[in-house]
Amino acid sequence: MRGPNGVIKNVAETQGTLMLPFLRPKVHDGWMAVAWVEGRFDLAHVHRVPGRKPEVTLLHSCPRSGEDDYTLRSLRKELGLGHYRCTALLDDGEYQMLQVEPPQVPAEELRDALRWHIKDALSYPAASANLDLLEIPAQPGSNARRRQVWAIAADRTLLAHRASSFAQAGLQLAAIDIPELAQRNIAALFEEEGLGLALLSFDAAGGMLSFTHGGELYALRRIDTPMGQLAGAEATQREALFGHIALEAQRSLDNFDRQFGHINVRRLLVTPLPESFAFVQYLREFLSVSVDELDLAEVLDFPALPELALPLQQTRYLKVIGAALRDAAN
């Protein structure tokens, strides 16, 4: 069963706005994801039709100038955001995602018990943490007592500020997401039935290597190599960075095999990078799995957005598109 998509499933009740049904604007199908990224807003909308590839119908980017609610209000007028159900994608450093063995307590007490279980890892009081849980599926026949979960925590003050910005702009904020689960949503589209998939992406914060199977997120590894460092490296330095990343990837593959031997990972996808052909070739020679450059055109349609055919644009918008790929039920 697919777990939650982010640290808040429904934040409508926090916005303090009550509208009569006949006053509510018509809402487009799908999700509009709004991401806070390096001093700018990135937006993506995805429309799903059963039996067809999901379609990316909108991509937009603009600088954050002044107060967020002012920028969001401008976007509402420019893009008609009032007619979309929105999810806000948190930036790195605005949340924590921890893999833990949950305390052995009754289900109704688990959330509170876990809150205090991870309190030393938080930079704010545990009582101020908004906490969500994502179960990691256990290997068939394994000891249920050793199950693992992802604990996703964010400061309530930050989340309330996000919700307030949307409310003041007159927008519907229905959920809040994180990049790890946005990447999971992308990976799920590329999975082959019965096989696991590794996906390696890069952005300004560094590399993120995820392992998924059946649409579930099993493992993650952060790699401390930002995309800008790769793009600006001289040949000798770039070779060293490639080696570091390849070693981290192989260690992660080996560790995943030890932990989840029942899942066969045969393929690693890499988001496009400057000099990406050289990087993919390097990984192919180093790693024990098939390595390919990710191409969103394999799993998504975007007829009105020809710029998304450009490889580096796919890397730039990968996670905000992933956030817009939330399940309709969530």
Image: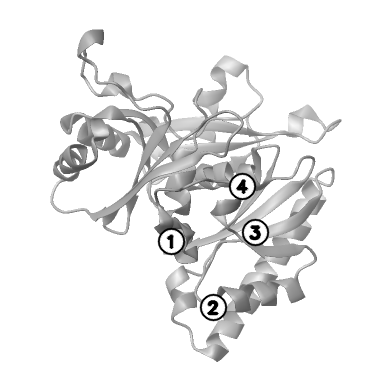
Kindly report the distance in space between the C-alpha atoms of the residues bearing marks 1 and 3.
Answer: 16 Å
Residue 86 tag number: none
Q: CA distance from mark 2 to mark 4?
A: 23 Å
The residue to which callout 1 is attached is 313
Marks 1 and 3: which is nearer the front? 1
The three-letter amino acid code for the residue at tag 4 is Ala
Counting residues from the N terminus, which is met first, the one under dot 1 or under dot 2?
2
Q: Which disc number belongs to residue 269?
A: 3
Residue 286 falls left or right of residue 323: right
* Residue behind mark 2: 275
Picture layout, residue 127 above or below residue 93: above
Residue type, mark 1 in image = Gln
Q: Give the mark, 1 or 3, whose residue is nearer the N terminus.
A: 3
Q: Residue at x 54, y 66 (%)?
A: 272
| Front residue (pair 28, 195) | 28
How would you rate the neighbour count of disc 4 (Cα within 10 Å): few for under 14, some for 14-19, many for 20 or more?
A: many
**Could you tell which of marks 3 and 2 lies nearer the N-terminus?**
3
